[in-house]
Structures are given as structure tokens and as C-alpha cells.
Amino acid sequence: MRLIDVPAYFDGLQHIFDRAHARVPLSQEKQRKLFAQVLSACAENHGHVYRRYLRYLISRRPKLGKAAFKFQRTFLKKVSRNVDKNDASDMARKFGLIYAGGRMGIESGVLPWKTSELFDAIRKCYEGARALLLDDELLLRVGRKKLRSHLISLPKLDELKKSELTELAGFVERQENCYKCVLRAEAFGRIFTSRHQQRLVLAAMIQEGKITLANRRGHQEPRPQEQFVWPNAKRVRSYEILWPRDEERSRKRRSPRSPEVRKAVSAP
């Protein structure tokens, strides 16, 4: 991951001044002035601070390695996750080295920042870069959101005519203890950006007991059932996911302004 790959815009803003505007949006004119000030300051100070910084580092040469490692570890402890794989861990170490350099810059007096400001800035860049890593954790999280969004949009079975089912991708049916969503296999597959992402979501649904499984023979691995008879008496290749209503109610209590409809799905 090169630094030029790190996103410059955060939090939905259309410019890089994510703290300067406070609660007031920046006008185009204000943005142009800020950009001009940054360019001017860079041109005027180019090289001066760097030479002071290098002299400071050279003066601490015997202790430089230990100090850099200490600051790097401080950063890693705050941003690392147990589920991080090699790519994410390697990226955290590199951003940790940038953080160490910043800490030394503060100690040398060439940077007029607070330690907390430095950490917030480096962490924000690190998380922006980390989000670009398509690891299984990220793929699964994004896949879940896509699936949930699609299921919520499905029509309710009790509001449909049987003749309409022929053209529909799926439907949702409220049952005593859960919501059941039945979705055609091909429609389910189109939700995800890759077959790998689809497999990750299916595996999670199986592990959580939220998808109807096929009858197992012997010691075969559990897999979703892929054929169901729909209310119009047609056998359709589809998936069926059962989502507990208790889980829906607990989510509503946690997020009263954005309730999520829980359903059961038939997946391909």
C-alpha cells in the first residue's frame, strides 16, 4: 500500500480540510484560499524543518532504534485487531513507523502538535488505507449489509397474488418466531460482488443457524437447501433464511430511528 493510495477525503467531505470548517461548510472561495496558503507555506519552508529534524535524530543515534520501536508499538497496540491478517498487520507496522517519526518530530520541537493530534491524524489515514484491503473480514461485513438491504426491500407474501410470484425474485413471510425470506438463487448471487463474498456470507448464515439446510447424508458438511416449492406450487431453485424476531426487536431498541426488518431468506 503506497501513501498515494490513501484516501484524502473523509466523512463525506468534498475537500481535505476535515477539521478547519468546524460546523460551517467551506465555500469554494474559502477552499481555494486554504489550498493557496498550504502551497505557499510548503514552498517557503521546504527543507528547513527537515534539516533540523535530521540533526535531532543524529544527536540521538545510540537510542534512536529503541525509541522508534517504542513509539511504533504504542501505535500498534491502539489500532491492531485480533482478526488482522498479514496485509493489515504489515500496514499497521508501516503507519506505526510514520507515527514514530511524528513523535520524534514533536520531541525535537520542529512540530507544534500535540501527541493526541498526531495519533488521530495517522490513525485516520491508516484506517482509510486499511478499508481498501479486501480481506475476508471486510468482504463479509460488506456482504452482510448488501444482503440485509436486499431482504428489506422484498415484498410481503400476504400482499401478493400467486400469479405475481412467477416474475418476482423473492418474498418475505412473517412467522410466529421469525421472518422467512425466500429468494431465487440467481437473484441471491447478483447481490454480491464475487463468488467468494457469496460463499463467506453463506458460511456465516450456516454457522448462525439462519439458513435452511439440506438433509445431510453421513458426515457431509452442512450446506443450504437449494430447492423449495413456492406458494404458486412451482419448484424454484432458491434459498430460505430464517431470522429470529427477538433479534429484530433488540435491534430496534438499540437503534430506534433506523429499524431493520428481520427476515428469512432462500439463497442459491
Image (cartoon, rainbow, N blue to C red):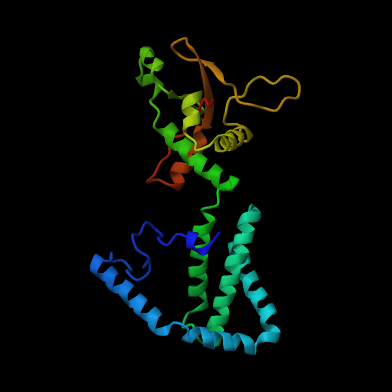
Given residues 123 and 60, the one toward you in this image is 60
The residue sitting at 63% across, 65% down in the picture is 93
Residue 117, image x, y percentages:
48, 74
Q: Left or right of 175: which side holds 71?
A: right
The residue sitting at 40% across, 15% down in the picture is 166
Q: How many marks?
A: 0
The relative height of residue 241 versus residue 44 in the rendered view (above or below) is: above
The relative height of residue 161 versus residue 33 in the rendered view (above or below) is: above
Residue 224 seen from this side: yes
The relative height of residue 146 versus residue 26 in the rendered view (above or below) is: above
Residue 1, image x, y percentages:
56, 59
Given residues 196 and 159, the one toward you in this image is 196
Residue 85, image x, y percentages:
65, 53
Quadrant of image for the C terminus: top right
Given residues 152 and 93, the one toward you in this image is 93
Residue 52, image x, y percentages:
53, 88
Given residues 233 and 126, the one toward you in this image is 126
Residue 175 seen from this side: no
